[in-house]
Image (tube, rainbow, N blue to C red):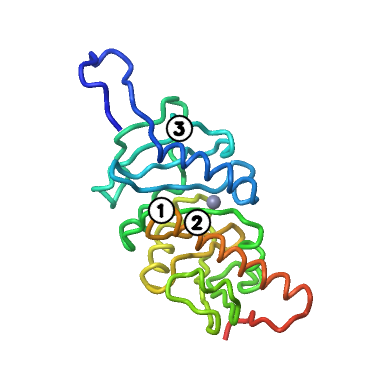
């Protein structure tokens, strides 16, 4: 990320877009193919040495270009301080940004993903019938080993928080859920999707895929009448 140093201020600024911006676009296409970012939903952010790269809001996520990606100051985590806007001034930063910042601030995350996966939504509905706060649980599944500190022969729990009309209004309840569950790198939003983070983008992606597998496993097991633990205590 470098601003052209000798440009008169009256000229349009020239920005560099790098590998991390390309990666944001690649992952948006991948997550779209998984059904995590259809209908302009979902979001992604990745931190590197330049700052926090964030996809734009309300756009076809599978079609964004590197110059559509915002860059935020990673030294300021209690708000979004833009270092480099998207080239198109009509684009807005992701609605998820305050939620992403909570995971960066509270967990020192290297990347934070937001998925609108139907499996996350359905599993939340199974565990929290009316969209109230709840807990997702799975147990004895091999894919649990892809989650930080988890083995296959134990119980995984993920907090569920109620949805809100605007994404940014989730920030307070997501913050409370993150602080109350230090061993968990995800928060499910009822009727909506899931936020997942990791120490870097690969770790976040791996954990997001493993969580999605667990969500789907619980939903499909319920459909088949198989005894996977579903109910809140
Ligand atoms: Zn969302």
- The residue at 48%/70% (across/down) is 147
Contact, CB < 8 Å: mark 2 with mark 1?
yes
Label 1: element kind: strand
Cα separation between marks 1 and 3: 17 Å
Is residue 15 left or right of 43 when viewed as pictured? left
- Badge 1 density bin: few <14, some 14–19, many ≥20, Cα 10 Å: many
Q: Is residue 134 above or below residue 72?
A: below
- Badge 3 density bin: few <14, some 14–19, many ≥20, Cα 10 Å: many
Cα separation between marks 2 and 1: 9 Å
Q: Is residue 223 above or below residue 77?
A: below
Label 3: element kind: helix
Q: Residue 205: give its label.
A: 2
Residue 189, given in percent of the width and then of the height, sits at 54, 62
Is residue 90 left or right of 72 when viewed as pictured? right
Residue 157, given in percent of the width and then of the height, sits at 51, 76
To which residue does mark 3 refer? 66
Say whether disc 2 or disc 1 marks the residue closer to the N-terminus.
1
């Amino acid at each position: 990320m470098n601003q052209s140093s000798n440009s008169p201020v009256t000229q349009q600024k020239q920005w560099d877009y790098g590998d991390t911006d390309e990666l944001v676009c690649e992952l948006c296409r991948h997550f779209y193919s998984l059904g995590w970012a259809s209908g302009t939903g979902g979001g992604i952010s990745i931190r590197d040495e330049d700052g926090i790269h964030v996809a734009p809001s309300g756009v076809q996520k599978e079609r964004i270009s590197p110059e559509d990606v915002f860059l935020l100051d990673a030294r300021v985590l209690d708000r979004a301080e833009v270092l480099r806007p998207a080239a198109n001034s009509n684009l807005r930063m992701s609605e998820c940004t305050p939620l992403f910042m909570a995971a960066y601030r509270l967990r020192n995350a290297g990347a934070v993903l937001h998925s609108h996966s139907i499996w996350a939504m359905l599993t939340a509905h199974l565990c929290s019938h009316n969209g109230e706060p709840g807990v997702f649980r799975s147990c004895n599944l091999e894919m649990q080993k892809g989650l930080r500190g988890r083995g296959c022969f134990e119980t995984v729990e993920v907090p569920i928080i109620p949805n809100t009309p605007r994404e940014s209004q989730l920030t307070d309840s997501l913050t409370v859920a993150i602080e109350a569950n230090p061993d968990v790198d995800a928060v499910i939003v009822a009727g909506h999707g899931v936020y997942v983070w990791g120490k870097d983008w690969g770790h976040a992606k791996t954990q997001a895929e493993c969580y999605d597998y667990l969500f789907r496993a619980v939903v499909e097991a319920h459909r088949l009448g198989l005894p996977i633990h579903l109910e809140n205590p």
